[in-house]
């Protein structure tokens, strides 16, 4: 009931309050009318008793006059006066029946001298309250009086017979007169009893009706007051809450919540304000996040520009130096090593960016393999020791397990994570120590990379794994880097089912990073997802093999020709897709290297058209697009394999070898 009231609309609540007040007032008026009507009926009943008593007295008086004067007119008066109590008797007897004839009752009371308008009230009193003790006693006295009246009438008939005889027996007359007087005395007693009982009953009924009337008035007033005050208080409270919330939102406090106390218009308005507040808060938060992201990305792009331009500048500068004829062969080799090292660093930066994109887009492919961890870590130590030595640092790799440990995970991604963490430690450590420990802990393998470097400021630690974040992003920062290494390592670790965390860091004493990955056994890994380590087979010669190189860049054509010429392959060239189709259909090339982004006709269209013309020779996509969907698109149009730029010679040789000698 309470929930029903809460969910009513404000208008309906007003209708209920007003309607309830009207209903209660109607009850009050009905009670008042009932009380007045009942009291009026009692008054009529008492009045009828007065007429009955008066008629009885007059009848006895006329009968006494008849005895003393023997004039028949007094006897006739006696008969007339007796009609009133006789009429009341008729009505009383009819009302005592279970289904009385109200016309007979009405005619009887009319004969008894009761006013026609009072008769219905008298009937209601006798019918409604017949079980009330006062009415019962009064009706009992009335019934006894009627029986005495029968005796009076009988004695009057005996007197008339005595007076009609030739000789009146005075002794008999005295006897009858004495009986009539005795009956009159008894009737007087009954009339007094009747009147007394009716008086007490009327006062009782008056008190009862007055109590009912007062109770009705109190109920009406208190209920009306309660409904009005309750509704008004709730309405006022809701309006104040809505007003306060609107003021708070106006002041910028978007976290305010208005209590929703009902489902009426006020509750709906409160819910709407709450939704508006949440939406505004979300929009403002999104705007602030977008602004913050834009600032971070702006810093990142500036950093990327610096990180990419720096190696490009070195490469271009070294190339310019190599053009100088006075440079010795020994110096040329030194500069070429610098160009190679710088180019690989540039490739690593681009690969990190691509890996971040793959992880966030869900396109990173994980290839778990089973391998012994000890040999893997020995290989990693050998690879990183040279860099550690170049920086004047000591690199230590230790196992905490006494027994050999084999794990199942993506070997290349695990190496990528550890290389990132070790590189990071070496970069921020000068003439110190970097230590790598590893071992099983329960169902996990835990790697710890600790250093004795500069440490990480406490205020920078919580943002350490955010995209593009660097502890020092100023223009005067000492240490180079893209700010991608740690966040990429964390994302890759999570892709392997683990995580990377900063265990601790103290300024001036160093940091400890922890890599955790699941220790899976072969039984817990889907065999279909378990890749075997690639078996490196010796490459056969490409002597006299013909290759069509399709690329719109002359420099790329020359670079690929240089790689293939070293293996004895013969190259032909096409600058766009149209030329490639014409040459491929006219010459039996062993394989086609197809650039996918070209003018006039791109490599996708050219490959599809060749396959439509039933060209069966292998085609390898050669593109700078390095995402998973790019590979799938190339394979879908008919390419046999896919290579990304910049092309690595060994990977190019192996791909051609596998396809040509398949």
Image (tube, grey):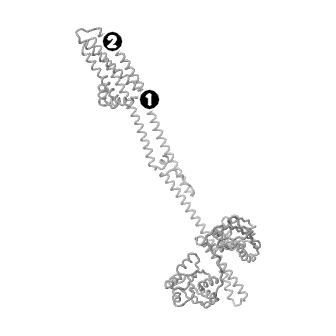
Residue 542 lies, in percent from the top left, at 62, 88
Q: CA distance from mark 2 to mark 1?
A: 44 Å
Instruction: Name the mark on residue 7.
Output: none
Residue bearing the label numbered 1? 207
Q: Is residue 301 visible?
A: no
Q: Is residue 225 visible?
A: yes
Q: In the rendered view, would you say 562 is above or below 249?
A: below
- Give residue 180's quadrant in the image: top left
Q: Answer few, some or many: residues within 10 Å of disc 1's Cα (few below 14, many 20 plus, some between 14 and 19).
A: few
Closest to the observer, 245 or 466: 466
- Give residue 298's quadrant in the image: bottom right
* Residue that sits furthest to the left in the current view: 166
Residue 256 lies, in percent from the top left, at 56, 55
Closest to the observer, 245 or 493: 493
Residue bearing the label numbered 2? 178
Q: Earlier in the sequence, mark 2 or mark 1?
A: 2
Residue at image coords 29%, 10%: 172
Residue at image coords 55%, 56%: 249
Q: Answer few, some or many: residues within 10 Å of disc 2's Cα (few below 14, many 20 plus, some between 14 and 19).
A: few
């Amino acid at each position: 009931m309470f929930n029903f009231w809460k969910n009513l609309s404000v208008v309906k609540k007003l209708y209920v309050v007003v309607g309830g007040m009207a209903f209660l007032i109607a009850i009050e008026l009905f009670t008042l009318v009932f009380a007045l009507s009942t009291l009026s009926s009692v008054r009529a009943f008492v009045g009828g008793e007065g007429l009955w008593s008066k008629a009885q007295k007059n009848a006895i008086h006329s009968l006494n006059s008849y005895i003393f004067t023997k004039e028949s007119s007094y006897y006739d008066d006696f008969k007339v006066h007796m009609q009133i109590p006789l009429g009341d008797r008729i009505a009383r007897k009819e009302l005592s029946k279970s289904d009385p004839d109200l016309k007979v009752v009405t005619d009887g009371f009319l004969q008894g001298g009761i006013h026609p308008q009072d008769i219905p009230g008298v009937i209601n009193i006798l019918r409604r309250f017949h079980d009330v003790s006062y009415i019962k006693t009064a009706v009992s006295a009335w019934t006894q009086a009627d029986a005495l009246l029968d005796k009076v009438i009988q004695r009057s008939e005996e007197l008339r017979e005595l007076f009609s005889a030739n000789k009146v027996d005075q002794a008999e007359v005295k006897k009858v007169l004495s009986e009539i007087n005795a009956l009159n005395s008894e009737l007087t007693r009954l009339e007094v009893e009747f009147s007394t009982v009716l008086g007490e009953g009327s006062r009782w009924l008056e008190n009862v009706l007055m109590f009912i009337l007062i109770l009705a008035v109190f109920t009406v007033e208190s209920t009306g007051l309660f409904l009005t005050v309750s509704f008004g208080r709730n309405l006022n409270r809701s309006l104040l809450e809505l007003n306060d919330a609107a003021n708070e939102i106006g002041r910028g406090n978007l976290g305010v919540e208005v209590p929703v106390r009902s489902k009426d218009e006020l509750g709906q308005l409160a819910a709407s304000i709450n939704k508006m507040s949440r939406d505004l808060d979300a929009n403002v938060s999104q705007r602030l996040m977008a602004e913050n992201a834009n600032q971070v990305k702006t810093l990142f792009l500036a950093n990327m520009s610096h990180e990419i331009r720096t190696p490009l500048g070195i490469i271009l500068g070294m190339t310019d130096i190599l053009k100088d004829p006075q440079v010795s062969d020994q110096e040329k080799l030194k500069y070429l090593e610098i160009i190679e090292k710088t180019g690989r660093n540039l490739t690593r930066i681009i690969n990190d960016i691509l890996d971040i994109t793959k992880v966030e887009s869900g396109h990173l492919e994980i290839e778990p393999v089973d391998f012994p961890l000890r040999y893997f870590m020995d290989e990693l130590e050998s690879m990183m020791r040279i860099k550690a030595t170049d920086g004047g640092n000591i690199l230590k790799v230790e196992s905490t397990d006494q027994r050999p440990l084999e794990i199942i995970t993506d070997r290349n991604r695990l190496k990528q994570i550890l290389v990132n963490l070790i590189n990071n430690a070496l970069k921020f450590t000068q003439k110190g120590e970097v230590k790598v420990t590893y071992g099983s802990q329960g169902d996990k393998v835990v790697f710890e990379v600790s250093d004795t470097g500069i440490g990480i400021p406490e205020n920078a630690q919580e943002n350490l794994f955010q995209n593009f974040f660097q502890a020092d992003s100023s223009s005067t920062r000492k240490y180079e880097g893209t700010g991608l290494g740690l966040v990429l390592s964390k994302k890759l670790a999570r892709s392997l089912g683990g995580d990377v965390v900063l265990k601790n860091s103290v300024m001036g004493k160093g940091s400890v990073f922890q890599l955790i990955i699941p220790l899976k056994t072969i039984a817990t890994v889907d065999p279909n997802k378990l890749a075997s380590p690639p078996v490196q087979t010796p490459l056969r010669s490409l002597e006299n093999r013909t290759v069509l190189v399709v690329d719109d860049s002359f420099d790329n054509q020359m670079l690929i020709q240089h790689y293939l010429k070293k293996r004895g392959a013969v190259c032909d060239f096409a600058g766009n897709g149209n030329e490639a189709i014409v040459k491929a259909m006219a010459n039996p090339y062993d394989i086609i290297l197809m650039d996918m982004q070209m003018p006039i006709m791109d490599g996708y269209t050219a490959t599809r058209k060749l396959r439509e013309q039933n060209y069966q020779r292998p085609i390898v996509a050669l593109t700078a697009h390095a995402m998973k969907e790019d590979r799938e698109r190339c394979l879908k149009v008919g390419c046999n394999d896919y290579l990304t730029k910049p092309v690595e010679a060994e990977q190019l040789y192996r791909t051609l070898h596998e396809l040509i000698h398949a």
